[in-house]
Image (tube, rainbow, N blue to C red):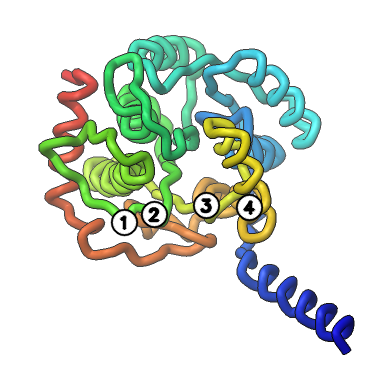
């Protein structure tokens, strides 16, 4: 009886885990022939799976990442798995605003189109400082992408209808922004939460500014994904998290589905500025829908990155 009980309990536990990890899959088969897609952090994780899926739909895909060697390896894999040769990479360090400016200058010189910008790259809950002395989470997750999008916005408008997709997280709900200390860098998890909330406000204000100009914006929570974010932490933490991620988190391919959905589906056009999770628009906490805060953050971000 003990053996039978153990087997039954194990089976029930397995089914519960499988139920917890269920996610929708993007069923839209729309092609992206003639379109250009830029994916930051496209050399690994969700970014790489997104790049593969969109290249397979005929898009010209450019992955932007800091490590050139990893980018070359990822590019070969993306080409192989998508069966598309129209994939390239460019060097970009979101922790260095000068790198962002140089990247945009080069991109605008080389590329005539930008139809979908996917702000995918990000830093996990770590303490550290960017080259411009911003907290690593806020500097990379928000300010780097804010400057990147701002400098590429005219090209997006020229290629309208176009889209900007920014990856965020449902952990935004655990913090609020403090405009007296946007560069907060004390408790790692809180810095991460604030940067993800900033992504949501950024998406809302971008949508408002681009209303009627053919550019739509979406904030996407991909779910809790088995990616390589643990590489920034100790070996013991990585071992523990690998077990937890295997049990409760979804694969990168599954995590990319909502990003792909927002990039290809015409159903999302009516929801510009919205927060998406599991391939559908998802309600936000009231404080995360404050248009005044979104506008204030946009203006503060312009000052921080020294946009004219």
Q: Relative to residue 57, is residue 15 depicted above or below?
A: below
Q: Earlier in the sequence, mark 2 or mark 4?
A: 2
Q: Position of residue 264 (x, y in %)?
A: 55, 49
Mark 3 vs mark 1: give the one in front: 1
Residue behind mark 2: 171
65 sits left or right of 211 in the view: right
- The answer to whether mark 3 and mark 1 are in CB contact below 8 A is no
258 sits left or right of 153 in the view: right
Label 3 – label 2 distance at C-alpha: 12 Å
Question: Which is more toward the observer, 247 or 205?
Answer: 247
Q: What's the residue at 49%, 33% (across, down)?
A: 121
Residue behind mark 3: 222
| Residue 172 visible in the shown view | yes
Mark 2 vs mark 4: give the one in front: 4
Q: Earlier in the sequence, mark 3 or mark 2?
A: 2
Q: Earlier in the sequence, mark 4 or mark 3?
A: 3
Residue behind mark 1: 174
Residue behind mark 4: 245
- The answer to whether mark 1 and mark 2 are in CB contact below 8 A is yes
- The answer to whether mark 4 and mark 3 are in CB contact below 8 A is no
Question: Which is more toward the observer, 248 or 234?
Answer: 234
**What is the secondary structure assignment of the residue under circle 2?**
helix
Label 1 – label 2 distance at C-alpha: 6 Å
């Amino acid at each position: 009886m003990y053996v039978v009980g153990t087997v039954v309990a194990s089976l029930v536990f397995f089914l519960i885990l499988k139920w917890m990890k269920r996610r929708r899959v993007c069923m839209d088969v729309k092609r992206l022939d003639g379109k250009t897609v830029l994916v930051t952090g496209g050399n690994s994780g969700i970014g790489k799976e997104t790049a593969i899926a969109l290249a397979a739909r005929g898009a010209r895909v450019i992955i932007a990442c800091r490590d050139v060697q990893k980018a070359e390896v990822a590019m070969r894999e993306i080409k192989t798995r998508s069966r598309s040769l129209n994939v390239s990479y460019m060097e970009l360090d979101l922790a260095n605003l000068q790198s962002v400016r140089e990247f945009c200058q080069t991109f605008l010189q080389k590329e005539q189109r930008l139809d979908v910008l996917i702000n995918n790259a990000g830093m996990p809950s770590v303490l550290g400082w960017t080259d411009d002395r911003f907290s690593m989470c806020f500097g990379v997750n928000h300010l780097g992408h804010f400057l990147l999008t701002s400098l590429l916005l005219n090209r997006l408008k020229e290629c309208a209808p176009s889209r900007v997709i920014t990856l965020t997280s449902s952990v935004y709900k655990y913090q609020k922004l403090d405009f007296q200390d946007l560069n907060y860098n004390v408790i790692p998890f809180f810095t991460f939460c604030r940067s993800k909330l900033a992504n949501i406000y950024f998406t809302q204000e971008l949508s408002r500014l681009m209303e009627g100009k053919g550019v739509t914006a979406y904030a996407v929570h991909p779910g809790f994904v088995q990616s390589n974010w643990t590489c920034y932490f100790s070996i013991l933490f990585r071992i523990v998290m690998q077990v937890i991620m295997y049990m409760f988190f979804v694969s990168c391919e599954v995590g990319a589905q909502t990003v792909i959905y927002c990039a290809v589906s015409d159903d999302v056009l009516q929801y510009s500025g919205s927060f998406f999770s599991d391939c559908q628009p998802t309600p936000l906490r009231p404080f995360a829908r404050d248009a005044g805060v979104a506008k204030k953050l946009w203006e503060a971000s312009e000052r921080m990155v020294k946009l004219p």
